[in-house]
Image (spheres, rainbow, N blue to C red):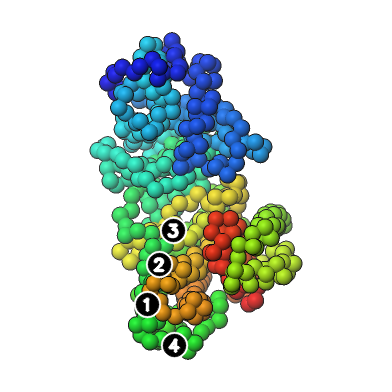
Amino acid sequence: MAPQASISASNTHFQFNKTWEELLDSDAFVKAFLSDVLEDYIVKQRWYGGKASKLKYIELVEFFKIQQKGEVYYGLILEVNFVEAFYQHYFLPIAFVTDENFAKKDRILPITIKNQNGFIIDAINLEAFRKLVFERIATAEPFDNTKVQYHKSHLFENISYESSRFMGLEQSNTSLVYNEKYVLKFFRRLFADKNPDYEMSRFLSEKKGYKNTPSYLGSINLVDSDDDYITIGLMQEMVPNQGDAWDYMLKELHKVFCNLEYKNIVIDKLPNTELYQRLGIRDIPPQIIDWAGLNLFLQVETLAKRTAQMHIALGSEFEETAFTPAHYNGDYSVWLKNKMLYQFQNRLNTIENNIHKLEGLALQLANEFLDKKNSIRKRFLTFDWTKLKGERIRIHGDYHLGQILVKDNDFYILDFEGEPESTIRDRKVKQPPLKDVAGLFRSFHYAIYATIFNNAETHYKASQEALFNAGEVLYRYITGLFLGTYVTKTQNANLNLGYNQERIFILKYCLLEKAVYELGYELNSRPQWAVIPLKGISNIINH
């Protein structure tokens, strides 16, 4: 505990004649804590996901001790109820500190406990707490049947605590870096089930030995009063890296667009190819290699191999039912159509309400979307599972260039939490592996257009329309090479993606789903970028 310091009584709102260990059993304390004080604190946190809704009240659903050798902290599970009649659960570990100078920005509540003045703060700010959690994982027994279950992997042997710091930059979780080698991710938003990130990380690394994701090292799960497993923390190795694949791709693509002028390339004379045509590296014409450079295509090929290997690992399980491959059936079809129709109607309303913000190509494409809304809806409904022979597996679910780290011309895949808008149950539904491929293709499309938007006025001489045309040609070769490499690799490993026509149907279905999903975000937050998903939708409905 931090050294004693005096705090003037005027600062201290609450006084309790209880010890810290008894405090959470006090109804008066819980009531004071859950009042406006905690509401004011929570809504300011980066990890709080309810900013678009109106908070009604907060309840303490559960609390538990996080302790070792007499040192005690509390983990709280808070239920945030909203005026719109839904709720979210959050994890908040708390500590009591008595040092006036400590954690000034992260104080939740000034308080006097047993005549000792201090503050309740988020415990993650305390090195003593970070060290305790690390040591609880590092010394975990193989079978832990207590309420708070610490687990460690066989890869995490004989490790002692040296240092810890915040990783920073995150929105929905809080990650800590230990010994500059390990990362512990605390999940702030909780679900009454094992977090997919924990499940997938442990499965890929411990059971399948998949090398291109950070190794699973340990975890903290809580068994709540309903006997549900709730994942609170996930410990993984830290992958030294040169940044994520999104930033890498933007730098590479900037060079490619600069080459248009540098190499005097006539955009209209660039050889084109069919969308979704499977290509090998030797199928890419010399003019395209000369323009974009061989390195870009070699990197796309590597990323396709790593993606295929991830899906092969996820599709090769026959014991653990959460991971065994499944065929398409009526239940999946109903689930998918309901989900798609709800999302489609939501995006349609968003377009109709925001069309006044659009101009130029975006407006033209938005009008095309509205004109063809019935045929797009029909595409979502014509999912006839009886004709599909491929398999569904557990997938990444939110796969894009920002979820991939670059290291020494190789790629490492992160963050298996799944699609942020989906429920925890929906994130665990087995899906076509090509859904991840579609997510990455949309990310390539975004990277191309983002490069044009970010640099067109300052670095490129060609008109925006000409740059868009060049970008679409490049997109076809990137995705064609990816698809060719990916399909060959998965077929050789007997992962069943279905026949060629089926693969293209699934890929287009998933691309359309992804682009419609993106459209809502862009129209609400940056309408000038709505042209990107709208162009993606146009590519599919006109192909």
Q: Quadrant of the N terminus?
A: top left
Rounded to the nearest angstrom, the CA distance separating label 4 from label 2 is 22 Å
Near-viewer residue (431 or 206):
431
Near-viewer residue (219 or 187):
187
Position in image of residue 135 (x %, y %)? 32, 33
Residue 158: which quarter of the image?
top left
Which badge, 3 or 4, is on the more N-terminal residue?
A: 4
Which badge, 1 or 2, is on the more N-terminal residue?
A: 2
Position in image of residue 155 (x %, y %)? 33, 45
Near-viewer residue (15 or 180):
15
- Identify which amino acid the numbered label 3 is placed on: Gly
538 vs 72: above or below: below
- Identify which amino acid the numbered label 4 is placed on: Val
- For label 1, the residue is 258
Which badge, 1 or 4, is on the more N-terminal residue?
A: 1
- Identify which amino acid the numbered label 1 is placed on: Cys
The answer to whether the residue labelled 1 contacts the one labelled 4, judged by CB atoms less than 8 Å apart, is no
**Of circles 4 and 2, which is in front?**
4
Residue appearing at x 39%, y 72% in the figure: 458
The answer to whether the residue labelled 2 contacts the one labelled 3, judged by CB atoms less than 8 Å apart, is no
- For label 2, the residue is 250
- For label 4, the residue is 266
Residue appearing at x 49%, y 87% in the figure: 268
Which badge, 4 or 2, is on the more N-terminal residue?
A: 2
The answer to whether the residue labelled 1 contacts the one labelled 2, judged by CB atoms less than 8 Å apart, is no
Rounded to the nearest angstrom, the CA distance separating label 1 from label 2 is 12 Å
Rounded to the nearest angstrom, the CA distance separating label 2 from label 3 is 11 Å
Q: Secondary structure at mark 1?
A: helix
Rounded to the nearest angstrom, the CA distance separating label 1 from label 4 is 13 Å
- For label 3, the residue is 402
